[in-house]
Image: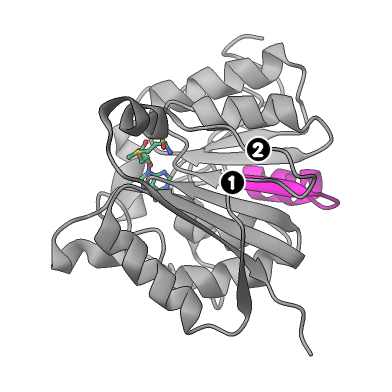
Amino acid sequence: MNNDSKDMPSASTKAQRGSAYCAADNPFLGSRGLVGGSGEKRKHRHNNPYEHPLLLRPYDVPEHITAARQLFANGPIEVEIGFGRSHFFRDRVLQAPETQFLGFEIKLEWVRRVAKFLAREDRMDCRVVLDDARPLLLQLLPEESVRVFYVFFPDPWWKKRHHKRRIMTQEMLDVMYRLLEPGGAIELRTDVRDYFARVDELFQNDARYERIEPGIDQNGQALPLTHREKKCRETGIDTYSLRARKASQS
Ligand SMILES: C[S@@+](CC[C@H](N)C(=O)[O-])C[C@H]1O[C@@H](n2cnc3c(N)ncnc32)[C@H](O)[C@@H]1O
C-alpha cells in the first residue's frame, strides 16, 4: 500500500470544498464550535495531505462521502471518535472481525498509523477519517446503521466558553440517536469527573436511552483499554465510564 493510490479521487475545486458540512438539519453546521475554529481553516493545516485508500478526507474530497455511505450501507458498524494513539481501535478491530469500523481523529500521524494497520490486516471494509467527527457523522453514515459509538477520554475543554466544543452534548446525543441501530449503544470513558457528571445527567434526562453495563460488547467480551486509560491505571487516576443503549420505543 503506498501514498499515491490510483483509487483516490482527486482533490475537489475550491467551490466544492466545505459542501460536506452543509447537509440540511445537521446541527454541527459551519464554523460553530468546530475544533480549532472553522472547517474551512482546518483544511490548511494539512498542506501536504497524506493519501491512502482507507483514509477519508471528506472536506478536501467530497466524493469520499458517497463512497463511505456505500461502504457502510449494511453494517454493523462501530465508530470511535478521537481514537488518539489507537490502542483501543486496533485491538477492537482484531477482536471483532465481522464488524466494520470507522474511526475519527484530527491528528495526521495517528490517522496514518491506523490506515496502514487496516491495510496490513486486510480490513478493506473499515475507514479512518482525518477531521472533526461532529459535522461528518450525519454525512458519512446512514441512519440506524451504527451498533456502538465509542468516545474515550475526549478532550475536556475546561473553560466554560469552550464547553460547546466538547464531543458529548445534547446535540450529539440527538445525532447519535438517529444513527444508532435499534438497541445500539454509546460508550463513554473519561477521567474528568465534571465532564462525566454532565454527560451522565444528559442521559438521565433523555428517555430515549437506557443505561447498561459498560466495558463489555454485545457478545459479553471485555472491551480493550485505550492508551489514556492504561496511563490512568498506571498512575492511579480515577476513571468513569457509562454505556447507554437506544431504548426500544413502546
Ligand atoms: C485525550 S485524547 C484521547 C485519545 C484516546 N481516545 C485515548 O483514550 O487514549 C482525545 C483525542 O481526541 C481527538 N479529537 C478531539 N476532538 C476531536 C473531534 N472533534 N473529532 C475527532 N477527533 C477529535 C484528539 O486529537 C485526541 O487525539
Residue 119 covered by magenta stretch: no
Residue 62: x %, y % from top left: 59, 47
The answer to whether marks 1 and 2 mark residues whose Cβ atoms lie closer than 8 Å is yes
Residue 96: x %, y % from top left: 76, 33
Q: Crowdedness of circle 2 by 10 Å Cα count: few (<14), some, many (20+)?
A: few
Residue 234: x %, y % from top left: 32, 25
Of the pair 98 and 222, the residue shown nearer to us:
222
Residue 108: x %, y % from top left: 40, 27
The residue wearing badge 1 is 215
The residue wearing badge 2 is 222
Q: Secondary structure under badge 2?
A: loop
Give the image quarter of residue 177: bottom right
Residue extent of the magenta highlight: 64-79
Quadrant including the C terminus: bottom right
- 230 on left or right of 128: left
The amino acid sitting under disc 2 is: Ala
- State which image quarter holds ligand 1: top left
Q: Crowdedness of circle 1 by 10 Å Cα count: few (<14), some, many (20+)?
A: some
Q: Residue at x 28, y 33 (%)?
A: 236
Q: Secondary structure under badge 1?
A: loop
Q: Residue at x 60, y 25 (%)?
A: 90
